[in-house]
Amino acid sequence: MLDGGPTGRQVLRKAVGGQRRRVATASLLGMAHQGCEALVPVVIGVIIDQAVATGATGPLLRWLLVLAALFFALSTCYRIAARITDGSAEHASHGLRLTLGAKVLDPRGGADKGRLPGALTAIATGDATRVGATAAAVTYALSATAGLVISAVALLRISLPLGLLILLGVPPLLWLGHLISRPLEERSEVEQERAAHASGVAADLVAGLRVLKGMGAEAAAVSRYRRTSQDSLAAALRAARSRAWHDGAILALTGTFIAIIGLVGAHLAMRGSISVGELVAAVGLAQYLLGPFQLLTYVNGEFAQGRASADRIAEVLASPPAVTAGTTVLPDPVTGRVRLRGVTYGALRGLDLDVAPGSLIGVVAGDPAAANDLLLCLGREADPDEGVIELDGVPLTELDPDDARRAILVAHHDADLFEGSLLDNVRAAMAPDARDAGPALAAAAADDVARALPQGADTVLTERGRSLSGGQRQRVALARALAADPPVLVVHDPTTAVDTVTESHIAARLRLLRPDRTTFLVTTSPALLAGTDLVVVLDSGAVGARGRHQDLVADDTAYRAAVLA
């Protein structure tokens, strides 16, 4: 793999090369199958000349046994080769999915930049499958080529002109097939790109369905998806038409070529240059050649689509990381002192902030983009363009992203739950030697949620926790973040769907659960802000005001409007 990432050709070569043993074994068996199939018309020709024409019974039985052995060998080789070939394609595509998964899950990030989650899913499924299919296509290509060579040798023994006709005619035919496949490759790439985008839009709309309904924006969402879907359909139809023209053109070329072989064989038989049995063998070989040619047509199309998909996979694998990986080690234990000096990123403009260990600090941002960019920087999903963020005196940019995120856990507002029990969701981020999740459940008021469920905390939740209400999901997600017990916890709007009384209980319990841990509450909830040590107000990406919640409510009109509105 190159420093800038692999090319599409390298992705394709690696996918096939990784299955070299399976491809080699299947190719040998496939060649044996094609060879036996090519010899069938030759043996039939021999039977006609040595047994049927002479009326000899012994040679007839002997050659019939040879014919039966050929059919047994070709059927056995075909079954085993097909099984291994399909396995090579599946293993190759699975390997690509693992590689893509590793890239997407890389702590440094970058693979998802400019791509919807559904688009990445489409690349990891459709494109990986198409590239994996090229491993099978190699087996088919080698098998078909072996069939052509054996047919040419047999025809050379029958007649020199027929053999030379195949040997000299096949290379130009293959070259023309390659030229014909180029439009298919280009349109296949566009087709996959549009299909991936449509999948991404669909996944995005489904994830935000409740929000869209709440806003009354269903019509706009449907219109957007309809346009995207129609673009995808148009690209698919263009690719299908290109595939049809490709297959039709190749079939016409091969049909013409086979017809020429048959005519030449018939002409030689009429002149007496070959016997009746040899003519039958030649015609049979000409008909047999249709199979390898159709196989090569299929291989051409698979490689054309595989190359297009390989280019798309290479783009993902070559995506630059969003953050760098440092090697500095944090002090043990981590006290949780956080300092921001001149941090500029997105909506943040020269942000300065100093948070003492064990502090419970509130952050109020009038601009949601500023809050989001602060979360990205603290969670090392992005590095500041300017300035530095330090944890216990160590810049986050000098830490490995995994180490930084274990020390600073950012719980986003839109945190998802997974399918499993409520308790398993809460324990997901806990250390193996951690205590029970009871205190975290109680602090987030998620124990009330558990008591309301049929099997309590062992109740299995549906995908994304959709069996819970919005407020219940928020409480379980907050309990999960609290149960992780990181030195620094950053929570973004954890109680927007929770009733006021429950929110007050959560605010009171947060300090009790994390007395010696640093906690950021990025929120505009007055109940949560009232329990903090300090509130920092972000204005135009920098600190506009700071103080205790009660003082800011009394003295700052803008703060009062933002928090109490």
Image: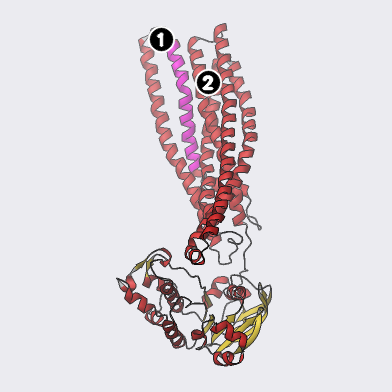
Quadrant position of the N terminus in the picture: bottom right
Instruction: Quadrant for residue 148, please give it.
Output: top right
Q: Between tags 2 and 1, which lies in front?
A: 2
Name the quarter where the C terminus is drawn. Answer: bottom right
**Residue drawn 64% across the image and 32% down it:** 175
Within-10-Å neighbours for mark 2: few <14, some 14–19, many 20+: many
Q: Vertical placement of 195 versus 508: above or below?
A: above
Residue 43: percent from left, percent from top: 45, 18
Q: Main secondary structure of the magenta part?
A: helix
From this view, report whether residue 155 is shown above or below residue 495.
above
Q: Measured from the top left, where is residue 331 in percent x and y?
A: 56, 82
Q: Are marks 2 and 1 in contact (CB under 8 Å)?
A: no
The reply to whether the magenta stretch includes residue 24 is: yes
The alpha-carbon separation of the residues under discs 2 and 1 comes to 22 Å
Spot occupied by residue 445 in the image (x, y as percentages of width and height): 40, 80
Residue that mark 2 sits on? 286
**Which structural element holds mark 2?**
helix
Query: Which residue does the image show at 44% across and 17% down from the upper left?
Result: 44
> What stretch of residues is rendered in magenta?
22-48
Q: Is residue 404 above or below residue 181?
A: below
Q: Nearer the viewer, residue 470 or 558?
A: 558
Q: Secondary structure at mark 1?
A: helix
The residue drawn where x is 63% and y is 43% is 186
